[in-house]
Amino acid sequence: MKTFKWVMLLLSVVLVLSACSNSSGEGEVASDKPVLEKKEVKPPEPITLKVFTNNPQAKLDVYFSDELKKKFPNVTFQFEMSGSPKEYLQKLQQDIAANDPPDLLTLNNGIIDFVIQNDILQDLTPFMTKEKVDVNRLRPGVLDSVKAYSTKNEVLAMPMLTGPIVIIYNKNIFDKFGVAYPKDDMTWDQMYDLARKVTRTDNGVAYRGFDYMGSFWLFNQLGLPLVDAKTGKSVLTSDGWMKWVKNFDRFFQIPGNEFMPGPTVNDRFIKDKNTAMLATSAPLWDGGQLDSGGINWDMVTLPAFADHPGVGAQLIFEGVGVAKTSKYKDQAFQVVNYLISNESQQSLANNGYIPIINDKAILSSSGKANPFLKGKNTQAMYKMKFAPIPPFFEYNPQARAVAGPAIDGIMAGNADAVTGLRTGAEQIDKAVSTAQSK
C-alpha cells in the first residue's frame, strides 16, 4: 500500500514539472513548432490597360482572346484604334500629350520604326529576366530580328505571330497548260523557268507567270539595308541590291508578264484568276478571299537564292510592346508574356496564324480551325529560315518612302538597274538629310 502511494506521488511530481517546463509566462502551452498565421490573400486590384492598335476588331478578338481575359480577371482592356501608320503615330502623340498614354501597343514592321523614332517603347529585357522568359522557345532568328530594331540591343517589342512570304499558285492554270506545279525548296532560277512556261495568252486571256506583293523588296532574302547605319548614306548601289534587282527584273521582262504595280496584285490572282504564282503572305490574312474567289490553290516555300539555300524573307511580324509611360508596366508585360505562352500560341495557330514559338506540334496545327487552310501545304509557311533584318537606322521610314518607287521604276522598265539604283540612292540621301535637319 505504501509502495502504491509512493508511485502515485512520483507521477504527480513528474506531471507538475512537465507542465511547468512547457508553460509560457502567461500560463499558455508553448509548441516546438512555429504558429503559422493565416494571411488573407487579397485579389489583384482592378486595373485598365489601354491598348493602342491599328488592327480590326476581328483580329483583336483573336489576340486578346477569352482565355487571356480569364487569365487576367482583374484587367479591363480598353482599345484605342487608329488607321494608317501616319494616323497611328499622330493619335499616339496626341494621347501622350493629353496625359492619356497607352500601356500596350500592337506593332508590326510597318509601324515600329515610326514608334521608335518617338522613343515610346519600353525595353522588355528586364521584365523578361524577372519573369524568367525562356527565349529558346522562340523560333530561331526571331529575337535577333527584334533586337535589330534597337541600337542598344534592346527588345522593344515581342512578336506573337509571323507572316512568312510564300508562293501561292493557281493549280488550274498549271493544269490548263500541262505544266508541273511548283515545289518546295526551289531556287529563283527554277522559278523563272516555270514562270516562262505559264506566261501565255489563251482564248484571249493573258496569263501571267509570276508577280509579287508591293512591299516584297522590303523583306528581301539577302538582308539588304537601304542605308548604312554608321555613315547614314544609302547603299542602294551595292552589289547585293544589284543582284536582287536583276534577279526579279528578268521576271518582268518575260513578254506578257510586264510589271504592274499597285494593290491590284491580289485582285489579279483572286478575282481575275490570271496570275499563276504570287509571292505574298496573303494565305495568312486573306483566306476568305481566296475561298470566295473559287480558286483551286496551294502554296510552296519562297524560292531561295542559290547561294542562300533555305533562307526565306525577313521576319514579318505582329507583336506587342509596352509603353514607357505606362503606370502598369509589370502587369502589361505579364499580358505580353501570356501571348507567347503555349496556350495562346495554340489558339493563334488554330485560327490560321503562324506562331512565333518553336514548337512543331503547334506549328503543324496552324489553320486547324480555319477551313481555308485544310489540305494545304502549310509547312511552307514555317519551313524556311528568316533572313537577317539589317541594323536599325533611325530614318528608315524616310528611306523606304523613296526606295520603293525607285525599285518599281526599274521593274517597270523606266530605268536600267544601274541608273535606277543610282537615282534611288541619291533620293534616299536627300530624304534622310532633310529628316535629320528637322
Image (spheres, rainbow, N blue to C red):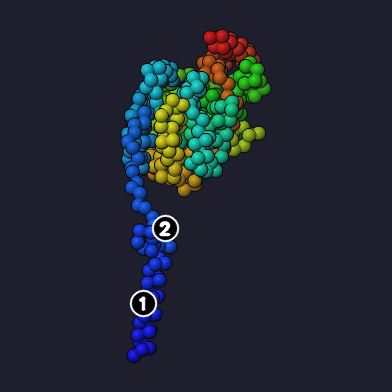
Nearest the eye: 140 or 334: 334
Say which residue appears at 33% left-offset and 29% top-offset: 78
Q: Earlier in the sequence, mark 1 or mark 2?
A: 1
Residue 46: x and y in percent read 32, 36
Nearest the eye: 124 or 165: 124
Up-down relation of residue 384 to residue 396 (above or below):
below
Q: Is residue 36 visible?
A: yes
Image quarter hosting the N terminus: bottom left
Say which residue appears at 40% left-offset and 70% top-offset: 18
332 with respect to 258 (left or right) = left
Q: Within the image, what quadrant is residue 197 found in?
A: top right
Q: Label 1: how many residues lie within 10 Å, few (<14), some (14-19) or many (20+)?
A: few
226 with respect to 69 (left or right) = right
Up-down relation of residue 86 to residue 41 (above or below):
above
Up-down relation of residue 284 to residue 83 (above or below):
below
Per the image, the residue denoted by label 1 is 12
132 with respect to 11 (left or right) = right
Per the image, the residue denoted by label 2 is 34
Label 1 residue SS: helix
Q: Is residue 190 visible?
A: no
Give how far apart the Cα atoms at labels 1 and 2 are. Answer: 29 Å
Residue 208: x and y in percent read 48, 25
Label 2 residue SS: loop
Amino acid carrying label 2: it is Pro
Q: Within the image, what quadrant is residue 344 found in?
A: top left
Residue 333: x and y in percent read 44, 35
Up-down relation of residue 365 to residue 151 (above or below):
below
In the picture, the disc for residue 334 is none
Say which residue appears at 33% left-offset and 43% top-offset: 42
Say which residue appears at 42% left-offset and 28% top-offset: 326
Amino acid carrying label 1: it is Ser
